[in-house]
Image (cartoon, rainbow, N blue to C red):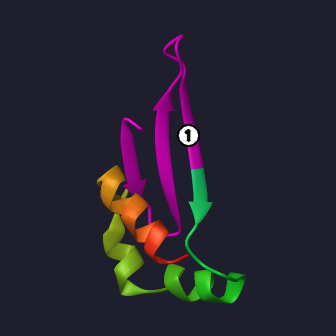
Amino acid sequence: MPFKCVDHGLVVSLYYCDPDANELEMQWGRFADVEEADRYLMSEEFSKMGMGRELDPEELLAEVKGSI
């Protein structure tokens, strides 16, 4: 399980530690295409996002499994 999970708006980042305490960030985009991402970047929602919001990794997993 990741030690931290953050929704940055455009991407979701999962942060892991390996056995040597090196941190690894994995991320994926939330939008299907560039135009959709551009609209989000110009939105009020994005301007209020800041650095993002932490997500519960278990809830994110359930969300991903529900969209398959």
Work out which quarter of the rendered image holds the C terminus and state it.
bottom right
Residue found at the far top of this picture: 20
Residue 32 at x, y = what percent? 66, 81
Q: In the figure, 33 relative to 51: above or below?
A: below
Residue depicted at x 48% and y 46%: 14
**Which quadrant would residue 24 be assigned to in this image?**
top right
Is label 1 in a helix, a strand or a loop? strand
Is 39 included in the stretch rendered in magenta?
A: no
Residue found at the far right of this picture: 34
Pick whichever, 51 or 2, lies toward us: 2
Q: In the figure, 37 relative to 3: above or below?
A: below
Residue depicted at x 70% and y 83%: 33
Work out which quarter of the rendered image holds the N terminus and state it.
top left
Q: In the figure, 32 relative to 56: above or below?
A: below
Residue depicted at x 36% and y 85%: 44
Q: Judge whether residue 15 can be spotted in this image.
A: yes
Residue depicted at x 47% and y 39%: 15
Q: Judge whether residue 54 can be spotted in this image.
A: no
Pick whichever, 37 or 32, lies toward us: 32
Is 20 included in the stretch rendered in magenta?
A: yes
Per the rendered image, the range of residues in magenta is 1-26
Q: Amino acid at mark 1?
A: Glu
Residue 61 at x, y = what percent? 42, 59
Judging by the rendered image, the residue that carries numbered circle 1 is 25
The number of numbered badges drawn on the structure is 1
**In-image side of 64 versus 62 (left or right):** right
Residue 25 at x, y = what percent? 56, 40
